Amino acid sequence: MGYKAAIFDMDGTILDTIADLRDALNHTFREFGRRSDFSEDEVKLFFGSGAAVAIRRALAVENGFPLERLEQIGTKDEPPLSVDEKLAEEIRAAYTPYYAEHCNIKTGPYPGILPMLRNLKRRGIGIAVVSNKPDEAVQSLNREHFEGLFDYAAGEVRGIRRKPYPDMVEKALGQLKTDRREAVYIGDSEVDIQTAANSGLDCISVDWGFRSRAFLMLNRADCIASSCEDIEDVIFG
């Protein structure tokens, strides 16, 4: 079917942010005298549910929590992580402004993203981006990379529950003046699959982001795109 609107995740979907996320996380952990050599593959597993969750996961792995268990989180509840919650919050409070200042050093759109977005706009599709990263970073990256293409862009702010709750998507639908039955959600992780389900939207999962194709299939992705052309084919029906 054809859609009138497309709502995108940011990290791992339209922007390759992993190097800056890794560098900011390692920098902040170093400031606290903690492990500061997390790899990109590790950091990919930490992120998806916001910075606070990512930091808790990183602390847990530092303390010996098996990385393979993070790989099995999927759409299940967050596994019990034994971490110092006060320390986790202190690290988050330091990480957030540091990342906001250093979020655009190595970050850039994935190949084909900008031409796809321009084509969607040209053909009258409303487009939005909603992310669990801090809103300050979302707005900065949106201004830097997307030429005013998005009709609506939002990150995590107080008073609006982060994904996979439907709040962000529902606000985007309101801004786009589009019924959920006429919109599709595009993301790269299990959080995005769950967000789409909670919001009543169809979902396109992309396999170039923070989760592998096999992981997405294990987590019941209905539709997996390997290119921007695949996304356009689904949107235009």
Image (cartoon, rainbow, N blue to C red):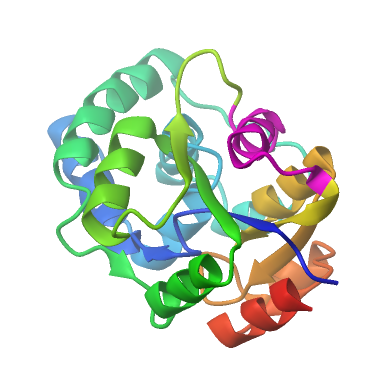
User: Is the residue 228 above or below the residue 56 in the image?
Assistant: below
Residue 186 placement, left or right of 221: left
Q: Nearer the viewer, residue 91 or 175?
A: 175
Q: Is residue 228 above or below residue 180?
A: below
Viewer-proximal residue, 103 or 145? 145
> Within the magenta stretch, is there residue 170?
yes
Residue 180 picture location, percent across and down = 80, 45
Q: Position of residue 235 (x, y in %)?
A: 71, 72
Percent from the top left, x then y, of residue 118?
Answer: 43, 72
Residue plotted at (39% across, 58% down): 149
In the displayed structure image, the side of residue 98 where residue 69 appears, left or right: right
- At 30% from the left and 18% from the top, the residue drawn is 90
Which residue is found at the position 38% from the left and 82% from the top? Answer: 111
User: What span is in magenta?
Assistant: 162-180
Quadrant for the N terminus, please.
bottom right
- Can residue 227 be seen in this snapshot? no
